Amino acid sequence: MERSEAARLLGIALDATPREVRRAFRLWAAMAHPDHGGSERQFALLCQARSVLLRPPPPPEITTPPRKAWRDVVVRPGPRGVALLTGLVALSLVAVLAVPLGPMPWSLVGAALASTATCMVAGRLLLNQPDHGHVIVTRSLAWIAVTALQCALAAAVGIPAFEALPLLAVPFVACISLVNPGAGLRRPSRSAWSVNVR
């Protein structure tokens, strides 16, 4: 029995409260009960209508849009975008060379911020209308590449940066956690991903 048919049978609105459903059932059952001269069939229909209306309606079906393929969201940055990205990578490497100028591990903060900025800009330059999953993966790959270069350069010049890798990761973890707080990875990104440097 459909909810609309059950509501019509009890003579109530489709969005009636459980209290209204029970009240209408009692009124009709008093007349339709077989012990009071009513029909068994009619009483059974009233009972069925009551159970249909007291049952919570099924939750609305939630559909998630299919994830776009990588080929649909990855774009090639223009010359200005490539220059910006190259400049940020160079700045990240220079920040590592500046580490001996201050006390460890605090002198690595500049290098950590530079690698995080590079991964954020890489996500903006390389993606067009991505969902959160695309953004997280792209930023992660960019950060890993830049941080690996920083650690290799630090090892080559004798700076113990690898031991402070957790410090290098702190701004990156914050950057990733802000992409998608409390939502599914397939939710489309709300920010405008078009950047003027493409």
Image: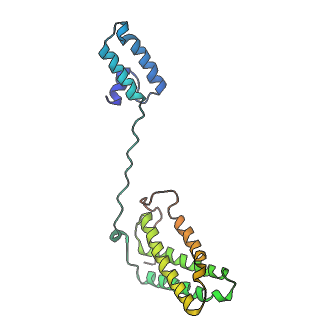
Instruction: List x then y, in percent, for residue 192.
Output: 46, 66
* Furthest residue in direction left, as rendered: 41
Residue 99 in view in this figure: yes
Q: Note whether 180 is above or below 126 in the view shown.
A: above
Instruction: Residue 130 in the image: state x and y as whole percent.
Output: 41, 66
The residue most toward the top is: 37
Q: Where is residue 16 in the image (x, y as percent from the top left)?
A: 44, 27
Colouring method of the image = rainbow
Is 70 placed left or right of 99 in the picture? left
Total labels drawn = 0
Vertical relation: 158 (above or below) 110: below
Q: x%, y% of residue 84?
A: 49, 82
Where's the N terminus, which quadrant?
Answer: top left
Residue nearest the viewer, comparing 68 with 169: 169
In this view, the residue farthest toward the bottom is 157
Q: Is residue 193 visible?
A: no
Q: In the image as oriented, which residue stretches furthest toward the right?
A: 103
Report whether 174 appears left or right of 136.
Answer: right
Quarter in which the C terminus is drawn? bottom left
Nearer-the-camera pick, 179 or 96: 96
Q: Residue at x 34, y 16 (%)?
A: 43
Q: Which residue is drawn at 63% across and 88% down?
A: 98
Name the quadrant containing residue 71.
bottom left
Rendered residue at 45%/80% (across/down): 81
